[in-house]
Image (tube, rainbow, N blue to C red):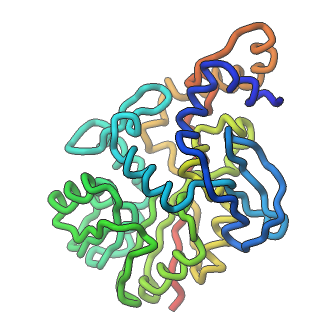
């Protein structure tokens, strides 16, 4: 039993497992990029595993929720009180004009700034648009489209932005070829059951020379490497594709896109503050000394052992479809 498993045998650690493992995963899968069944264990997360493909070295979660389970999961948690609450018991409410909404819009500054520099009159698709955080600060005259599963978020975003929001799963979305000038995917690619097929569809939907923005947790970040199982962006029910900056760059390139740059939003976000920096040092010390702490009977709460936000945890890729 490793340190993470020992920690999760105590009530404090079970809070993490209960949040991550609310459903029993049904699908044991191979690598979602190359379909190889040969893999080695990277680490365990409760009743599922994070594996590393022996053929292409991509990391992924297996077993994972089936599509039926995943749709049920999103239906149950989508914008519920529990879903909008993190381990620090902070509520993330992005409806109306809450402080949290304004903070989350600021967190998307790279996606918004890159789009505004690229065009001021475009047909734009936001996949997983939620409450329209990406739309909020776009300048110019755009035709806005979105894909979203949450009925509540669909109604809100349609009304607020007069946008064409498609209430469906991305697997079921259909658009004309070369239809969009910009496609944005903020925190979507790590959720996809079929990332290869979805990227083929996106390539068709985007016009030649069009802009693709892809944001994801970054499991090659220094914090991820130090914290491993305690990396706060682990979430085996949802984050099933474990992208690192190199693997995401390679995947988009193989999908036909030209990657211009990878950005790491942190210094302009709500998380760059004195409190989080102090917490980074405190939590890292607790993480390093956790085996000794457990032996001595001190079991920290999740907010003291999970990794805090830091530079590199999130990556935003700017890419273009070749002419």
Query: Hey, which quadrant is residue 95 in on the image?
Result: top left
Give the residue at x 62% y 55%. Answer: 26
Give the residue at x 70% y 20%. Answer: 286
Q: Position of residue 223 (x, y in %)?
A: 67, 39
The answer to whether any part of residue 315 appears in the image is: no
With 141 as the anchor, is 101 left or right in this view? right
Query: Hey, which quadrant is residue 295 in on the image?
Result: top right
From the viewer's perspective, is residue 39 above or below residue 13?
Answer: below
Relative depth, front residue between 32 and 91: 32
Give the residue at x 25% y 65%. Answer: 139
From the viewer's perspective, is residue 9 above or below residue 23?
Answer: above
With 86 as the anchor, is 254 left or right in this view? right
Q: Position of residue 276 (x, y in %)?
A: 52, 28
With 281 as the anchor, is 40 left or right in this view? right
Relative depth, front residue between 258 and 52: 52
Q: Position of residue 120 (x, y in %)?
A: 28, 74
From the viewer's perspective, is residue 212 above or below residue 64?
Answer: below
Give the residue at x 29% y 71%. Answer: 145
Number of residue marks? 0
Q: Position of residue 56 (x, y in %)?
A: 79, 69
With 232 as the anchor, is 143 left or right in this view? left
């Amino acid at each position: 039993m490793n340190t993470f498993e020992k920690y999760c045998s105590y009530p404090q650690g079970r809070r993490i497992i209960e949040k991550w493992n609310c459903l029993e995963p049904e699908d044991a899968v191979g690598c979602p990029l190359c379909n190889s069944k040969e893999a080695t264990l990277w680490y365990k997360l409760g009743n599922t595993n994070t594996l590393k493909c022996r053929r292409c070295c991509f990391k992924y979660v297996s077993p994972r929720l089936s599509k039926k389970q995943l749709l049920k999961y999103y239906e149950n948690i989508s914008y519920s009180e529990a879903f909008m609450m993190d381990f620090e018991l902070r509520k993330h409410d992005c409806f109306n004009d809450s402080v949290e909404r304004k903070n989350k819009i600021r967190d998307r500054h790279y996606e918004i700034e890159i789009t505004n520099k690229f065009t001021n009159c475009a047909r734009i698709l936001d996949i997983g648009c939620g409450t329209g955080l990406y739309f909020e600060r776009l300048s110019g005259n755009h035709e806005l489209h979105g894909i979203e599963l949450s009925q509540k978020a669909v109604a809100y975003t349609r009304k607020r932005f007069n946008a064409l929001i498609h209430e469906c799963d991305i697997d079921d979305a259909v658009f004309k070829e070369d239809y969009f000038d910009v496609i944005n995917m903020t925190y979507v690619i790590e959720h996809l059951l079929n990332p290869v097929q979805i990227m083929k569809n996106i390539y068709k939907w985007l016009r030649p020379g069009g802009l693709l923005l892809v944001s994801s947790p970054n499991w090659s970040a220094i914090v991820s490497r130090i914290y491993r199982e305690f990396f706060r962006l682990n979430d085996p029910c949802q984050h099933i594709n474990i992208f690192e900056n190199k693997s995401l760059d390679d995947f988009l390139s193989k999908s036909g896109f030209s990657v211009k740059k990878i950005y790491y939003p942190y210094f302009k976000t709500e998380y760059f503050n004195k409190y989080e920096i102090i917490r980074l040092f405190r939590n890292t010390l607790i993480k390093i000394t956790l085996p000794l702490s457990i032996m001595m009977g001190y079991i920290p709460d999740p907010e003291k052992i999970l990794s805090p936000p830091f530079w590199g945890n999130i990556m935003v890729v700017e890419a273009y479809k070749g002419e």
